Image: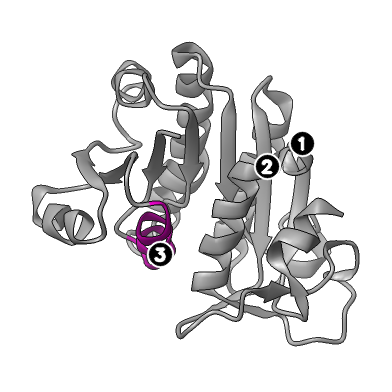
Amino acid sequence: MKVIVFGAHGRVGQQICAKLKSGVTGVIRSDEQADAIRKLGASPKVVSVQDPVSTLVEAIKGHDAVIFTAGAGGKGGAERTVAIDLDGAAKTFEASELAGVKRYIMVSAFKAAEREYWYNGPLRTYYIAKHFADRELQRTKLDWTILQPAALLDGQGTGTVAPIAGAETSDLPKQIFREDVASVVEASLKEPKTIGKVLPLINGDVAIADALAQ
C-alpha cells in the first residue's frame, strides 16, 4: 500500500513512517528535514498544506491512503493553528477526493467533539481547529477514520489500548504513547471496521488489533 503522511517530521509522523517504511511518502516543510525521513525508510516530499489545493492533488495522486498528523504545534499563534490544523487539513480532504484517493486517516485530539471538555482550557484554539476539521472530514465521501489520542507520551509503546467504547469515560490515565498511536494508524489501514469511525485512544490492556476489530 502506498501511503502519504502529512506531518511526517513530527513526533507521531516519524513513528508512522518508521512503522510503514516502504511505500510511504513523508510530507515535510523543508529539504532540511529530508534526511531524517529517509533514515526512517520513507521517501520525503517537500509540500506545505498551505500550498494550493492543486499542488496537494499532485502530491496525493498515486497513493492508496492519506494520513494527516500535521499541526502548527503551538507555533505562530492562533492564525497559524487555524491555517494548518483546520484549513490545511480541509484542503487535503478536497485534494484527496480530487485525486481519487478514498482512504483517509486523521490524527485528531481526545474529545475534540465535546466543547465542554476544552472550551475554557488553554488549548481552545487548537481544539476549535480539530473540532471543525473532524466535522468537515465526516461530511466528505472519503473512507475516513478519525483517531483522537489523549495526552501524548514519548517512550516505547505498549501495543495495547483501552476498549474504544469506554475510553472517554475510563478511569485509566488519559494518555497514550506516540508509538502506540502510530501502531493504531498502521492497524487501521488493515482493518476496514475502522472506516467511518471516531476512535478515542488511551493506553489500556487490549491488543490494538483486537480493539479495532470490535
Magenta region:
10-20
Quadrant containing the N terminus is: top left
Quickly name the residue at label 2.
145
Helix, strand or loop under label 1: loop
* 11 versus 101 height, above or below: below
Q: Are marks 2 and 1 in contact (CB under 8 Å)?
A: yes
Q: Residue at x 34, y 39 (%)?
A: 23
Residue 153 x/y as whole percent: 52, 82
Image position of 207 (left or right of 14): right
Residue 159 x/y as whole percent: 62, 74
Quickly name the residue at label 3.
15
Quickly name the residue at label 1.
196
Quadrant containing the C terminus is: bottom right
Looking at the picture, which amino acid does disc 3 mark?
Gln
Looking at the picture, which amino acid does disc 2 mark?
Thr
* 33 versus 157 height, above or below: above
Helix, strand or loop under label 3: helix
Q: Is residue 119 visible?
A: no
Q: CA distance from mark 3 to mark 1?
A: 24 Å
* 88 versus 17 height, above or below: above
Residue 66 x/y as whole percent: 48, 35
Graded by Cα atoms within 10 Å as few (under 14), some (14 to 19) or many (20 or more), the crowding at tag 2 reads many
Helix, strand or loop under label 2: strand
Upstream in the sequence, badge 3 or badge 1?
3
